[in-house]
Image: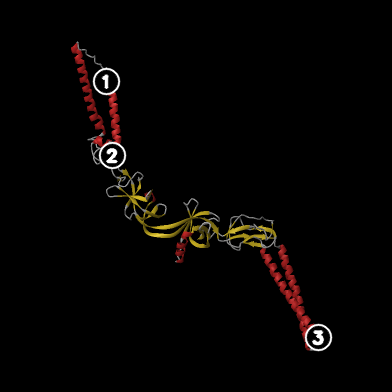
Amino acid sequence: MEDQWEEPVVRSPRSRRNAWIVVLVLIVVAGLAWALTRSGGAAPGGPGARAGGGGPGGPGGGRRQAATVGTAKVMPADMPETLAAIGTVTPIVTATVRPQLSGNIFTINFTEGQVVRQGQLLAQIDPRPYRLALAQAEANLQRDQAQLNLARVTLKRYQTLLSQDSIARQEVDTQAANARQYEGTVAADRAAIGTARLNLQYTSITAPVSGRIGLRQADIGNYVTPGDANGIGIITQTAPIDVAFALPQADLQRLLARRAGDTALPVTAKDQGGTTVLAEGKFLTFDNQIDATTGTVRAKARFANADGRLFPNQFVNVVLVADTLKGVATVPVSAIRHGAQGDFVFTLQTDKTAKLQVVKTGPANGARIAVLSGVKAGETVITEGADNLDDGSPVMLPGDKRPQMNRQRGGFWSGLFGGGSSAAGQGGQAGERRGEGQRRPQGGGQ
């Protein structure tokens, strides 16, 4: 039986070229995957270790890449312990200016919003009726004074006649009673004159206290009476001025102890946003009872308010300095992290690694926060770049240089063009040899 030779498949040059392209693409993809795995910090037994053949500290090993972080020193400082509350600006005196008698307003002597002084003339009521009443009272006094003088002269004459036994004692007693009656009438007339003069003064409406007067409630020509609810205006005393706020009853005892030692408690009033300081003052007093519904006690602080930045009935943020921690360790607020174990920080070690340290925080002043335990003054804490750190993670500072990748052994381009190209060339030569071996039997058969 004759041997039958299978006709070998002869590939065209175009097919071999396409195969080469596919092989090169696969080599490039594999090289990129290996490079990304190496730069991402592969595990010791992962692709990075296999590609480089090294351990965790060797080329291509699983050592984690160091993260760039920002740091700050733990500094000792005096940290105030504050209490925050929402307060209402309350004038010390709020006076409604009302007339003391009835009449038509003659003049208005103030402008709305003006700062007035105590005793300053604000308005004038028509004084003419009250001047006439004063003149009438004075006339009545003159008339009754004359009658009193006549009664006294007559009484003296009667007493002389009585001493001569020329008149009855009853007439003398009657005349003495008439004289005393006129004395009473004269005293009443003098009181009427005083009332008339006082009413005449009341026609001039003056400021009862110093402060800022509000909007005008009456105009010239209006008829006003003492019973008017609005009066002609309202004066509020703005310098000094108080701020009323509420504090938890849990803070009452320690604040009372501070005040018992004649210690002035500073108080700061800020705007509604809590960013702008409006005034600096001192704690004034507590209320005499605790609100049982809220568990708070009302308090007041007094401010000089010379510049008038605090306005009556204005809502402000009150910051009361209850105590001051002397020489406590402080760190930037950005260094404090929060986790399941509580508050913690990352401290920078000498070997450029981060150490997780649980801390107990205290009061803060906005930029820095007190640390009561966990770190000491002089240590270095990580403030930036700590989001992906763990205990023991390697770190580097902004001025440090990042180590270069090993390009000699297991390098990306050497693996791609060195080992990959030679392997591809050897595979190609073997393919050609196999093709020649298949073609030679075909030629020998012929």
- Mark 3 or mark 1, which is nearer the start of the sequence? 1
Residue holding disc 3: 168
The scheme the figure's colours follow is: secondary structure
CA separation, marks 1 and 2?
39 Å
Examine the image and state in which quarter residue 233 appears.
bottom right
**Element type at marker 2?**
loop
Please rate how many residues cluster around mark 2, counting C-alpha atoms within 10 Å: few if below 14, some from 14 to 19, many from 20.
Answer: some
| Image side of residue 311 versus residue 43, left or right | right
Question: So how many labels did they put on this image?
Answer: 3
- Mark 2 or mark 3, which is nearer the start of the sequence? 2
**Element type at marker 1?**
helix
- Mark 2 or mark 1, which is nearer the start of the sequence? 1
Residue holding disc 2: 43
Residue holding disc 1: 16
Residue 89 locus on image (x, y percent): 53, 57
CA separation, marks 3 and 2?
142 Å
Whether residue 154 can be seen here: no
